[in-house]
Amino acid sequence: GWGEPITPKELVKIATSYAKELGKYKTFKKGQPTMEWYYTFMKRHPQLTTAKSISFELPRAKIAQTIVDKWFNLLEKVLIDNDLFDKPSQIFNCDESGFADETERRNNILN
């Protein structure tokens, strides 16, 4: 994944750009993917679902500097212990750090 949620309309825009880049725009009735294409794409890929995003709660956004420092100290220890400082391709973000505090409620595609 890209680490950023995308909406169905954003997926159609990405697919449009990709189709044009590959010269495949003639494949589509209107020269580009439509929302109808999106629905058939989702049927072809049942592992993808959509879900509404939720706002980041204000109490969770107010974090003391000591907590942030403690987190970065732990991160540094993990990177050193696992010899990962020069291997960014082996580090994956699997937490909520990419959430904005004012997330718009919208459908996002999930894998």
Image (spheres, grey):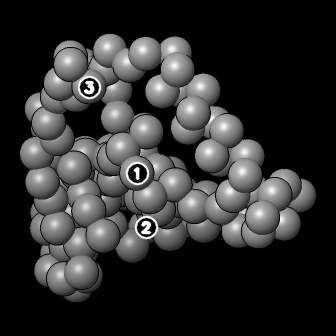
Task: Name the residue carrying label 2.
Answer: 26
Are dots 3 and 1 in contact, CB under 8 Å? no
User: Is 51 in front, or is 95?
Assistant: 95
Element carrying mark 3: helix
Residue 70, quarter of picture:
top right
Residue drawn at point x = 43 percent, y = 39 percent: 97
At 78% from the left and 64% from the top, the residue drawn is: 81
Q: Which mark, residue 95?
A: 1
Q: Where residue 14 appears, x then y in whole percent?
A: 44, 51
Amino acid type at image mark 2: Lys
Closer to the eye: label 3 or 1: 3
- Mark 2 surroundings within 10 Å by alpha-carbon count, few (fewer than 14), some (14 through 19), many (20 or more): few
Q: Position of residue 53 (x, y in %)?
A: 17, 41
Q: Amino acid at mark 3?
A: Arg
Q: In the image, residue 106 lies at what x, y percent? A: 14, 38
Please give the name of the residue rendered at 22% of the width and 50% of the height, measured from the top-left corner: 108
Q: Can residue 77 be seen here?
A: yes
Which labelled disc corresponds to residue 60? 3
The tag earlier along the polypeptide, 3 or 1, is 3
Q: Is residue 69 above or below residue 32?
A: above
The number of callouts visible is: 3
